[in-house]
């Protein structure tokens, strides 16, 4: 929730948003309420729909006092959502509408000198979108981009080396780059990683997985990664996949001139030092079959024909 929502909530309902460190408390505000509070603050809306907001408390259990467990939303669509029956519990007391007892409050003037108040940018495609007012007494100064911010921008835009250098040169021409920011940085941006990759024949492989993950800012726990091997008639590829898909995949072996055979599988696993990490291996049935040939003497391999995952207690090689 943005500072604007916090400020509007405090002014309208006379209390602050609390318990944000508790797991049972809501941590998000819907766009309708955020837009309503924004309009009320700038005077374009008279009031919200209720005078007292929904009050949340820690539920006693999940059977008799849990708002989400007791709200049945199975089979609900946009047309039938009006039929949902919302419970009124001690842990989730329903909001109260305006009446003669609860009058509509008036917004206070928001000071732009207060750095804690920021107007959140709402979705511009929204029908009720209102551009946030600009501070009248502050000078809009350009933001100077440092090397780290430029690298993040290039990565988010998925630019090539030439495109990255072009963007950097344009920003430098507009005096938007820090003095220590190098436009030519992207020409050799792979140098930190290339030293940890070698070529043997037609196979390019990673000789130090731990160091590559350290450069990527990732902690290498072999139990949290799977080794995915993909092969075809003329190519071979090995990629590390994170089990939770939270971290992007990391390629550690590739060749476009190696046929799929148990000899090439044996070479690949030795070069990437599979014995040192013992990742679980996943792949199609043909890859699993070739790996089985590589390790006929190992008795505790379990090959799953459904998922294609080889689980093992000892290394394959």
Image: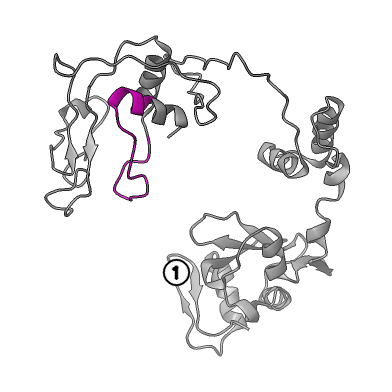
Q: Which residue is drawn at 57% across and 68% down?
A: 286
Q: Residue at x 18, y 19 (%)?
A: 102
User: For the residue carrying disc 1, how many other residues have a C-alpha within 10 Å: few (<14), some (14-19), or many (20+)?
Assistant: few
Q: Nearer the viewer, residue 85 or 20?
A: 20
Q: Quadrant of the C terminus?
A: bottom right
Q: Residue 85: x, y in percent? A: 14, 33
Please report the bounds of the magenta region as a residue range.
Answer: 8-28
Q: Which of 162 and 304 is in front in this view?
A: 162
Q: Tell whether position 316 is magenta.
A: no
> Is 300 left or right of 286, judged from the image as shown?
left
Q: Residue 23: x, y in percent? A: 33, 50
Q: Residue 290: x, y in percent? A: 60, 75
Q: Quadrant of the N terminus?
A: top left
Q: Which residue is drawn at 15% across and 15% down?
A: 99
> Is 94 left or right of 121, judged from the image as shown?
left
Q: Quadrant of residue 259?
A: bottom right
Q: Is residue 65 above or below residue 51?
A: below
Q: Residue 20: x, y in percent? A: 36, 44
Q: Tell whether position 25 is magenta.
A: yes
Q: In which quarter of the image is residue 61?
A: bottom left
Q: In this view, does 25 lie above or below 190?
A: above
Instruction: Evaluate whether residue 272 shows in this view.
Output: yes
**Magenta highlight: main SS:** loop
Q: Is residue 53 above or below residue 232?
A: above
Q: Find disc 1 in the rendering and name its residue.
A: 305
Q: Which of 298 and 76 is in front in this view?
A: 76
Way the structure is coloured: one colour
Q: What element carries label 1?
A: loop
Instruction: Evaluate whether residue 233 shows in this view.
Output: no
Q: Which residue is drawn at 18% across and 21% down?
A: 97
> Is 169 left or right of 16, judged from the image as shown?
right
Q: In which quarter of the image is residue 138?
A: top right
């Amino acid at each position: 929730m943005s500072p604007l929502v916090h400020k509007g909530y405090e002014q309208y309902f006379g209390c602050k948003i609390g318990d944000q460190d508790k797991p049972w408390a809501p941590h998000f505000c819907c766009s309708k309420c955020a837009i309503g509070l924004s309009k009320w603050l700038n005077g374009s809306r008279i009031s919200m729909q209720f005078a007292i907001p929904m009050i949340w408390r820690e539920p006693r259990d999940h059977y008799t006092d849990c708002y989400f467990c007791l709200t049945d939303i199975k089979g609900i669509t946009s047309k039938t959502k009006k039929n949902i029956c919302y419970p009124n519990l001690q842990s989730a007391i329903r909001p109260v509408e305006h009446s003669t007892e609860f009058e509509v409050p008036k917004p206070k003037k928001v000071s732009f000198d207060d750095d804690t108040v920021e107007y959140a940018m709402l979705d511009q495609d929204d029908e009720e979108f209102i551009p946030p007012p600009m501070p009248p007494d502050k000078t809009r100064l350009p933001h100077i981009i440092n090397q780290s911010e430029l690298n993040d921008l290039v990565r988010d835009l998925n630019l090539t080396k030439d495109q990255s250098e072009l963007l950097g040169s344009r920003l430098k021409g507009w005096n938007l780059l820090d003095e220590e920011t190098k436009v030519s940085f992207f020409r050799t941006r792979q140098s930190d990683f290339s030293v940890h990759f070698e070529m043997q024949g037609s196979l390019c492989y990673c000789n130090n997985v731990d160091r590559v993950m350290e450069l990527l800012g990732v902690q290498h726990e072999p139990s949290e990664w799977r080794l995915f091997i993909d092969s075809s008639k003329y190519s071979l590829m090995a990629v590390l996949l994170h089990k939770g898909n939270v971290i992007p995949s990391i390629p550690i072996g590739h060749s476009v001139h190696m046929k799929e055979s148990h000899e090439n599988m044996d070479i690949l696993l030795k070069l990437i030092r599979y014995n040192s990490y013992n990742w679980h291996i996943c792949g199609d049935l043909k890859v699993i079959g070739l790996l089985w040939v590589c390790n006929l003497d190992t008795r505790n391999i379990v090959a799953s024909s459904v998922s294609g995952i080889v689980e093992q207690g000892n290394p394959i090689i």
